[in-house]
């Protein structure tokens, strides 16, 4: 898209959020842009399942909300006339653009809770494993509803409370600090959706387990995708005694020689009415 083509899509009245926590999250995920793929097996699996629920809009625009490294851009481009890749982390956008040079995509820096887009300018929204990082899910859904055309759908996945419960339990053997991110529970999500004004088309909870040889392998994956930096973990490097205690705390979960990391993944499709 050139500037003339995109001017009618931009909401010139929306200001970018300057919340320091969001900036920290943007920096963390942005710093992981080049390493993200190495630890993103779960993200790819979940996103591919979400694609199956995403409504094609051959003559419209699809918004990839939280595009990350642009892994799904090509598939979304095949399902639409035009795709917008939006992310709060500029390095992610740069990486995604370099990865998808053959795709006609408009890359846009923005915040899901304050989209820099005009009203009713997109036909669909795709957002996989991003909305759990927003401060206000209701506001994020309201913004998607604002930019969606009538009958347009948002298909998204998010993480629920209980995600990485094995890791949280293992850390409790080390200290009482919070090392694992906390998320909403299903009841909270349902309440937000019930008050969103959207029509609920699909909702399904699918716990997904990723298996590791060691807890160190899990932590390396979390670091690779930038997620480890968003938890309220204690500062400083982990000592040998702490690492040993963490390993011992995780061992009771070992099954068939592997350690499980369970993610509570919620799939949702909403339609604007």
Image (spheres, rainbow, N blue to C red):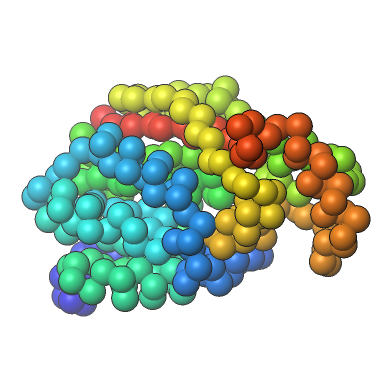
**Relative image position of residue 44 (x, y in whole percent):** 39, 49
Q: On the picture, is 197 further left or further right than 184?
A: left
Tell me where residue 98 sits by quadrant: bottom left
Looking at this rendering, what residue extends furthest in the left direction?
59
Q: Quadrant location of the N terminus?
A: bottom left
In this rendering, the answer to whether 176 lies above or below 67 is above
Q: Is residue 187 left or right of residue 67?
A: right
Q: Nearer the viewer, residue 147 or 222?
A: 222
Q: How far from the left and from the top, in percent, is residue 206?
A: 46, 28
Q: Outermost residue toward the front?
A: 257
Which residue is at 33% across, 32% downward?
270
Residue 81 against residue 52 in the figure, above or below: below
* Quadrant where the image shows the C terminus: top left
State the residue at coordinates (81%, 39%). 249
Residue 126 visible in the snapshot: yes
Q: Is residue 271 above or below residue 187?
A: below
Counting from the top left corner in percent of width and height, residue 201 is at 31, 24
At a point 21% along the width and 34% down the height, the residue shown is 151
Residue 158: give x, y in percent of width and height.
49, 39
Residue 50 sits above or below residue 230 on the image: above
- Is residue 84 left or right of 231 when viewed as pictured? left
Comparing 50 with 258, the one in front is 258
Q: Residue 39 versus residue 112: which sits nearer the camera?
A: 39
State whether residue 142 appears in this view.
no
Q: Quadrant of residue 166?
A: top right
């Amino acid at each position: 898209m050139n500037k003339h083509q995109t001017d009618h899509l931009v909401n010139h009245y929306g200001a970018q959020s300057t919340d320091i926590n969001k900036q920290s999250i943007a920096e963390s995920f942005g710093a992981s842009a080049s390493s993200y793929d190495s630890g993103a097996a779960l993200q790819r699996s979940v996103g591919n399942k979400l694609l199956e629920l995403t409504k094609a809009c051959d003559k419209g625009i699809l918004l990839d909300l939280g595009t990350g490294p642009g892994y799904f851009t090509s598939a979304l481009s095949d399902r639409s006339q035009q795709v917008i890749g939006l992310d709060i982390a500029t390095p992610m956008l740069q990486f995604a653009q370099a990865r998808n040079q053959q795709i006609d995509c408009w890359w846009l820096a923005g915040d899901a809770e304050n989209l820099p887009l005009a009203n009713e300018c997109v036909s669909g929204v795709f957002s996989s494993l991003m909305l759990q990082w927003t401060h206000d899910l209701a506001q994020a859904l309201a913004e998607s509803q604002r930019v969606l055309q009538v009958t347009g759908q948002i298909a998204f996945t998010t993480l629920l409370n209980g995600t990485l419960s094995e890791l949280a339990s293992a850390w409790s053997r080390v200290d009482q600090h919070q090392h694992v991110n906390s998320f909403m529970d299903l009841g909270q999500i349902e309440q937000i959706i019930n008050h969103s004004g959207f029509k609920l088309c699909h909702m399904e909870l699918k716990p997904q387990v990723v298996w590791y040889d060691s807890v160190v392998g899990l932590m390396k994956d979390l670091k690779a995708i930038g997620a480890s930096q968003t938890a309220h973990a204690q500062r400083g490097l982990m000592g040998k005694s702490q690492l040993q205690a963490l390993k011992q705390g995780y061992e009771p979960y070992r099954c068939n020689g592997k350690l499980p990391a369970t993610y509570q993944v919620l799939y949702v499709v909403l339609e604007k009415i």
